[in-house]
């Protein structure tokens, strides 16, 4: 396992920086990685404030470098987002275990999606984003297709889509989850947490305005489901 000991953003190319036609990345995050040799263990209530403090430190240092009098900022929102991820990983990779979590295994595993391009709503450089719940539609929903298709997240995304396109409130989404999620009642709180997280996108991602409102509506319906 590797530990991240430092991270910083650099500007690379702009969309006007080359005469070639194609996609160009405007920024990159450089990481210094070293082999982890310790067996330190941490607890979640210890890690959360450490991550928050490291992310704040990283972003503050970038703000100090940004020239307020320049015609264009040195760092974009994407640069700050990538830097925040890197800062969080600097903290998380310090530890071999976090409570009962094997950090090496959690950083390495995924949903088993073979081709992530199928998940993208836009693949243009500097504008890459995942599809919204509505854009996903019925893609990757067939049982047994892959691990993602059977996950709670995939079911939550489809349920959001059902609410967003319906005039019956949250009921179509709730009906989907109760019918398709095995042991719905034991997973209800996890589904609520997923929906509440997705509902926050309406404040930061324009493409998620409709779906995030549907997620909030559906989360409320599940909270009142007994």
Image (tube, rainbow, N blue to C red):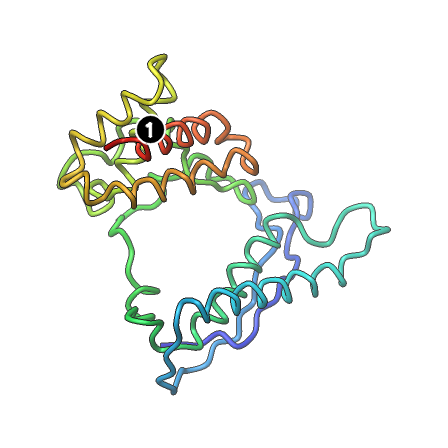
Judged left or right of residue 9, residue 154 is left
List the single residue furthest toward the right: 69
Nearest to the observer: residue 19 or residue 123: 123
Please indicate whether residue 135 sits to the left or right of residue 72 in the image. left
Read off the residue under disc 1. 221
Instruction: Write the residue at 75% across / 50% down.
Output: 73
Q: Is 139 left, or right, of 215 in this rendering? A: left
* Quarter assignment of residue 107: bottom left
Towards the viewer: 162 or 12: 162
- Residue 138 against residue 27 in the figure, above or below: above
The picture places residue 31, in percent across and down from the top left corner, at: 53, 70
Provide the secondary structure element on which disc 1 rests: helix
Looking at the image, the residue that sits furthest to the bottom is 37
Task: Identify which residue is drawn at 51% across, 59% down.
Answer: 85
Residue 35, placed above or below residue 151: below
Q: How many marks?
A: 1
Residue density around tag 1, few if under 14, some if 14–19, many if 20 or more, within 10 Å:
some
Quadrant of the image containing the N terminus: bottom left
- Left or right of residue 23: residue 186: left
Q: Position of residue 226 (x, y in %)?
A: 23, 33
Asked where in the image residue 2 lies, by quadrant, the reply is: bottom left
| Above or below: residue 68 compared with residue 206 | below
**Looking at the image, which residue is at 63% across and 48% down?**
77
Examine the image and state in which quarter residue 21 appears.
Answer: top right
């Amino acid at each position: 396992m590797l530990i991240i000991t430092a991270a910083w953003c650099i500007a690379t190319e702009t969309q006007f920086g080359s005469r070639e036609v194609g996609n160009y990345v405007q920024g990159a995050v450089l990481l210094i990685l070293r082999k982890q040799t310790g067996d330190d263990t941490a607890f979640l209530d210890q890690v959360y404030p450490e991550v928050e403090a490291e992310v704040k430190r990283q972003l503050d240092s970038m703000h100090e470098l940004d020239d307020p009098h320049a015609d264009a900022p040195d760092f974009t929102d994407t640069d700050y987002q990538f830097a925040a991820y890197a800062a969080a990983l600097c903290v998380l990779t310090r530890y071999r275990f976090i409570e009962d979590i094997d950090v090496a295994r959690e950083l390495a595993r995924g949903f088993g999606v073979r081709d992530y391009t199928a998940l993208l709503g836009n693949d243009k450089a500097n504008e890459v984003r995942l599809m919204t719940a509505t854009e996903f539609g019925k893609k990757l929903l067939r049982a047994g297709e892959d691990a993602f298709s059977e996950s709670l997240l995939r079911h939550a995304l489809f349920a959001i889509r059902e609410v967003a396109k319906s005039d019956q409130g949250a009921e179509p989404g709730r009906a989907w989850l109760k019918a398709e999620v095995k042991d719905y009642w034991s997973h209800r709180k996890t589904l609520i947490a997923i929906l509440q997280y997705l509902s926050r996108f309406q404040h930061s991602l324009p493409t998620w305005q409709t779906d995030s409102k549907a997620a909030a509506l559906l989360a409320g319906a599940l909270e009142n489901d007994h």
